[in-house]
Image (cartoon, grey):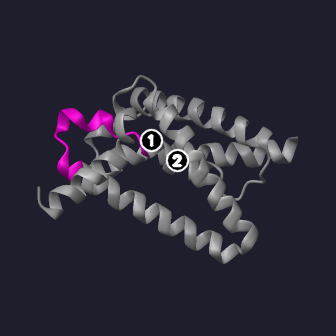
């Protein structure tokens, strides 16, 4: 196995979070494993605001590059194994939100409810099939939209609570 094949295999293992991509509720398990990344980004916000934005952009770019490399390697019937998109959506959901354990648990549950809801709404009302979108957009669209909606709902909850 040459270096390119090893790197592609590594990217597939990262995008599928190892065996988690084959498990039931793999997206939730991958999101749980991605919570330390969210906590790391929160720590960067307390250090400096610019460092937080830089870390967020670097992590997003890195995750998108891993996604793209994994999609080039996987065959189309294996795309369901890619579960790391939940981490990207979770990073967006917690962007600029105050940190506490209560909000972390609430946000985690709210994100997954919104993720399921946006998928159903977009497929039923707008007849949008995510897997038909080109490249990584097809995988990240639902997670990014769910992260943005969850973030907006968080701001509304902070305003009214």
**What predominant SS class does the magenta segment belong to?**
helix
Using the image, tell me which numbered label, if any, was put on residue 89.
Answer: 2
Question: Where is mark 1, residue-wise?
Answer: 142
Please tell me whether residue 85 is drawn above or below residue 128 in the rendered image. Answer: below
Give the x, y percent position of residue 76.
18, 38
Give the x, y percent position of residue 24.
41, 22
Provide the secondary structure element on which disc 1 rests: helix
Q: How far apart are marks 2 and 1 (CA)?
A: 8 Å
Give the x, y percent position of residue 4.
16, 62
Q: Which residue is drawn at 57% across and 54% down?
A: 37
Q: Which residue is drawn at 24% across and 49% down?
A: 71
Asked whether residue 79 is drawn in magenta, I would say yes
Residue extending furthest top?
A: 24
Left or right of 134 in this view: 30: right
Give the x, y percent position of residue 81.
31, 35
Please tell me whether residue 33 is drawn above or below residue 20 in the rendered image. Answer: below
Can residue 92 be seen?
no
Q: Which residue is drawn at 50% across and 33% down?
A: 29
Numbered disc in front, either 2 or 1: 2
Count neighbours of disc 1 (C-alpha within 10 A) and say few if under 14, some if 14 to 19, many if 20 or more.
many
Q: Are marks 2 and 1 in contact (CB under 8 Å)?
A: yes
Please tell me whether residue 93 is drawn above or below residue 61 in the rendered image. Answer: above
Foreground of the two, 143 or 120 = 143
Q: In which quarter of the image is residue 112?
A: top right
Magenta span: 71-84
Q: Which residue is drawn at 29% across and 46% down?
A: 133
């Amino acid at each position: 196995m040459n270096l390119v094949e090893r790197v592609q295999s590594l990217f597939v293992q990262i995008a599928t979070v190892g065996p988690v991509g084959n498990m039931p509720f793999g997206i939730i398990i991958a999101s749980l494993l991605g919570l330390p990344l969210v906590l790391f980004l929160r720590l960067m916000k307390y250090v400096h605001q610019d460092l937080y934005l830089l870390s967020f952009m670097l992590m997003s770019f890195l995750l998108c590059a891993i996604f793209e490399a994994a999609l080039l390697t996987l065959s189309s019937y294996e795309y369901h194994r890619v579960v790391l998109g939940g981490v990207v959506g979770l990073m967006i959901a917690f962007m600029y939100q105050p940190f506490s354990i209560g909000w972390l648990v609430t946000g985690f549950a709210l994100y997954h409810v919104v993720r399921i809801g946006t998928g159903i709404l977009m497929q039923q009302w707008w007849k949008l099939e995510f897997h038909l979108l080109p490249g990584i957009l097809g995988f990240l669209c639902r997670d990014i939209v769910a992260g943005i909606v969850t973030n907006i709902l968080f701001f509304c909850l902070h305003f009214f609570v």
